[in-house]
Image (tube, rainbow, N blue to C red):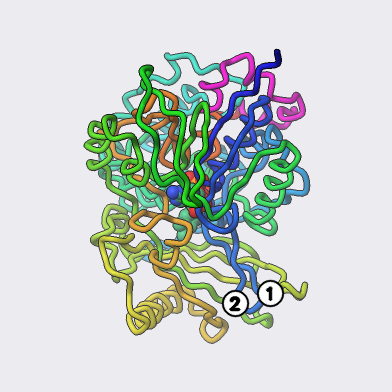
Amino acid sequence: MVNSPIHSLVLGAGVGGLSVALLLAKAGRRVTLLEKQSAIGGRLARFHRDGIPFDTGLHFTSSLVGILGQMLTVLGAEDGIEAENFPWLLRLPDGHELVFPNCGRKQFYEYLAQEFPREADALRKYRMLETEVLRNTPMFDLRVGLDDSMMAFSDMDQLPLGVLLEQLGMSPELSCALASPVLYHGGVPAEVPAARHFRVSYGFEEEMIRLKEGGDALIRNFRRELERLGVEVRTSTYVTGFQELDARGQCHSAELSDGTSVVFDDLFSSLHPAEIVPLLPSDNRRGFQRLVAQLEDTCGFFTIFATVDERCPVKPHLVSYLRDFDFNKIMYASSCQESFLSTGCVFSRERRQDDTPVQCLILLSPYPAPPSVPPPSPEEKGRMTKVVLDHFYESLPEMQGRIQVIAAASPHTYARYVPPGRGAYGVRMRVDNPRLMGRLPVRNFYGIGENAFAPGVVGTMLSSFLVARQVLGEGAYLGLLPERAFPDSFVAWNSNF
Ligand SMILES: Cc1cc2nc3c(=O)[nH]c(=O)nc-3n(C[C@H](O)[C@H](O)[C@H](O)COP(=O)(O)OP(=O)(O)OC[C@H]3O[C@@H](n4cnc5c(N)ncnc54)[C@H](O)[C@@H]3O)c2cc1C
């Protein structure tokens, strides 16, 4: 008799769900992927206005030479993915402009040492602490074992970033430069563990890149691999309830929104923890519900989508300008409301649907995520757009008269792919937060997605790899890693800590 393959149910087809679905299918499992929206991709997907493509949740990321390239290769989704170096600069409230070299971590620190010569000692200590955390984090090489000692918390997991910067006696300018990647993980310096900050900021110190065709390029490759591996994708479908647990504390059946039910061996949820709670079998819900109730979310972004006059050629790059030195104020949802203390300006060159070139600009300002504020009325949105643009022209006066606004979005607008009430990067990480990776109160349910390990596209994919590795077991997992995922260039990169 032939054993039927294990059947895994995956909830949510953003980058987290897509990655785990492919890994499980590659390991020989039967996989069903449920997506509430009518298309896969989640926050990876672009949208088009007037034939112009705009990104939603993937504007830039860290180098393809590192862990991202490895993961895409393992998933069979690396072909045709092209990236461009995406320089980034930071304008501080006092007018000091930092133009990061964007060509390696060593160069990043050399540059800062030049800019802040009197703080060389504090900077060296900061870099040393970061290096120690990176060395002890099994996330930069997919082959490195997950033994317990490596996953153990270090002192830097208990120390908030803001406290560390204070202890090192850094100036507000240098603190701002080192803390600025909070804009890419949503943490607040007063509460985010320094170790978590290091794990995200490392990628940006190394190299910031932008993908040609944005997340759509990834979705295209993921879709092809899903088809090739026979993954059943059911869009516009979601779970409405689960069967009660069996004697082993497991659950194997769910009712779906289309009136059907599905039977499965195990389940992988990329949903926000607060969204999965009401669906869980009732007797297992309470403890987890209490835990989830303590969690707060990151802020969202008020976003302006615009084009830049062709007569004013712009190079693709990111400018973040700050109107306050204090990232605690900038990132706390309640204080960022309407004051727009910082804006990230993403300049890029794209092609319209009719293949003509177009220069795009996306302005992202931290803004409270729903439900902490109600959706803005069209008038309020218009007023907020004006405030952000005024700040923009103040900071980049050379852009005056060169911008045409195409659309504006509050975090409520993103509710189509970010569940309502959720921040841009999901749960806000604090030193006292529990680890959420793989953790759901039903024995055969696993939590993946941005809240499991680290947010952002790379952090979210990593959580899928870490959870799949635990579930599949070392042998099966290592069997999924082809040699070509680890070219010589990667080894050199990885030993660069
Ligand atoms: C404005 C903005 C800008 C960002 N910029 C960047 C950036 O430049 N770089 C970067 O790396 N990261 C960025 N991020 C963060 C990044 O997009 C996310 O961390 C990452 O995409 C999360 O992936 P995910 O799979 O966990 O979630 P998602 O992509 O949200 O996927 C979850 C999926 O689940 C679906 N779903 C929801 N409920 C259900 C249900 N009940 N049943 C079935 N399906 C359901 C959703 O429709 C969605 O498709 C940004 C985010 C935002 C909002």
Residue 115 showing in the rendered view? no
Q: Residue furthest bottom?
A: 401
Q: Position of residue 37 (x, y in %)?
A: 53, 57
Q: Quick check: is 471 in the magenta stretch?
A: yes
Q: Mark 2 — residue? A: 307
Residue 31 showing in the rendered view? yes
Circle on res. 451: none
Instruction: Determine whether, in the image, residue 193 is placed left or right of residue 348.
Output: left
Q: Quadrant of residue 293?
A: top left
Q: Quick check: is 249 in the magenta stretch?
A: no
Q: Mark 1 — residue? A: 358
Q: Bounds of the magenta span?
A: 466-495
Against 410, residue 208 (above or below) is: above
Q: Position of residue 289 (x, y in %)?
A: 25, 38
Q: Name the dominant secondary structure of the magenta segment.
A: helix
Instruction: Determine whether, in the image, residue 330 is placed left or right of residue 401.
Output: left
Q: Residue at x 36, y 26 (%)?
A: 245
Q: Are marks 2 and 1 in contact (CB under 8 Å)?
A: yes
Against 339, residue 399 (above or below) is: below
Q: Secondary structure at mark 1?
A: strand
